[in-house]
Image: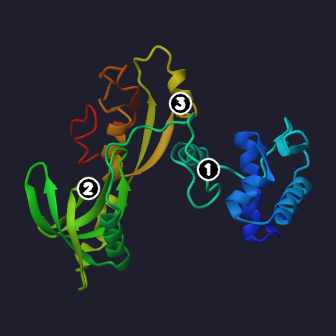
Amino acid sequence: MTRTALDALTHAQRERLAFIDFNLQYFGQVARADLIQRFKTGLAACTRDLASYKELAPQNLVLSHTTKSYHRLESFKPLFEHNAESILSALCLGFGDGLSNGVQPSSYCQDATRLIHPNSEIIATIMRAIASKLALECQYTSLTSGTTSKVLIPHSIVNNGIRWHVRAFDRSNQEFRDFVTTRIECPKILQHSINCEESVDKDTQWHTIYDIILTPHPKLKYPKAIELDYAMENGQLKLEVRAALLGYLLRQWNVDCTEQGTLNCNTYQLHLSNKSQLNLKDIEIAPGYQE
């Protein structure tokens, strides 16, 4: 009944009720002033929204005449699903457009310090090239070749856990490679059609999917701690990973890729348990990997 009633609401109404739901869930209370600040609506409209929410979920909140706010009850059951990672990110960085605009970054929720910050104009140009399926002329600086001119045909932007890179066909090397976005300068979109072999459907490593199995490192004394960290089932975490991204994942999460799990378990708490079943290529950056 509640689901049907929610579906009958307009998108704007659902957004306001989701905001009420979110505040009760994560802050324990919500007031009409919160709705006014977030949605710039009048007092009467806020009162109607709170009444609608209470009608849908009377067990979720109670009005405190002392604070003039609605408070969360122990019987609370969320009407909307709030993704934990999105919420934590919003708490750390401040809420942007969407669920809870106007709330400042939290002093009691801190994210990891980011040392690399992509240039928004560079990202915008790359994204336009991807969307239009066009080539990109740019200056690129690598650790091995320094600064060179390149023509890239990008098809995806990826966060490898540390920094953002673009997956693209490199005309100078005639193959698909990864390019760090912060090392790209002076990008210019070329207004001519790309060649067939340069399109995303020809990127074999991008379309090859590996089924990998991660387990707690075999030398750990208390593997249950790792099982809890990664929500493992029967001591395993099964993932589907693109071949082009597998090396980054294994390095980021310090996965021991040796056959018998011989690396230091204090540093490498995960083990790639089905390595022998995989035809792995081009993951030299993975810890303990030997082809």
Q: Identify residue for label 3.
A: 229
Expressed as whole percent of the image width and height from the top left, the position of residue 72 reads 82, 40
Circles 3 and 1, Cβ within 8 Å, touching? The answer is: no
- The numbered disc on residue 191 is none
* Quarter of the image where one finds residue 184: bottom left
From this view, report whether residue 116 is shown above or below residue 133. Answer: above
Crowding near the residue tagged with mark 1, few <14, some 14–19, many ≥20 C-alpha atoms within 10 Å? some
* Quarter of the image where one finds residue 112: top left
Q: Earlier in the sequence, mark 3 or mark 2?
A: 2
Q: Identify residue for label 2.
A: 182
* Quarter of the image where one finds residue 48: bottom right
The residue closer to the viewer here, 269 or 143, is 143
Question: The residue under label 3 is which amino acid type?
Answer: Asp
Q: Earlier in the sequence, mark 2 or mark 1?
A: 1
Q: Identify residue for label 1.
A: 103
Extreme bottom residue here? Answer: 192
Judge depth for marks 3 and 2 and give the one in front.
2
Q: Quadrant of the C terminus?
A: top left
Residue at 37% across, 19% down:
266
The residue closer to the viewer here, 38 or 263, is 38
From this view, report whether residue 80 is shown above or below residue 228. Answer: below
Residue at 26% across, 31% down:
288
Crowding near the residue tagged with mark 3, few <14, some 14–19, many ≥20 C-alpha atoms within 10 Å? few
Secondary structure beneath label 3: helix
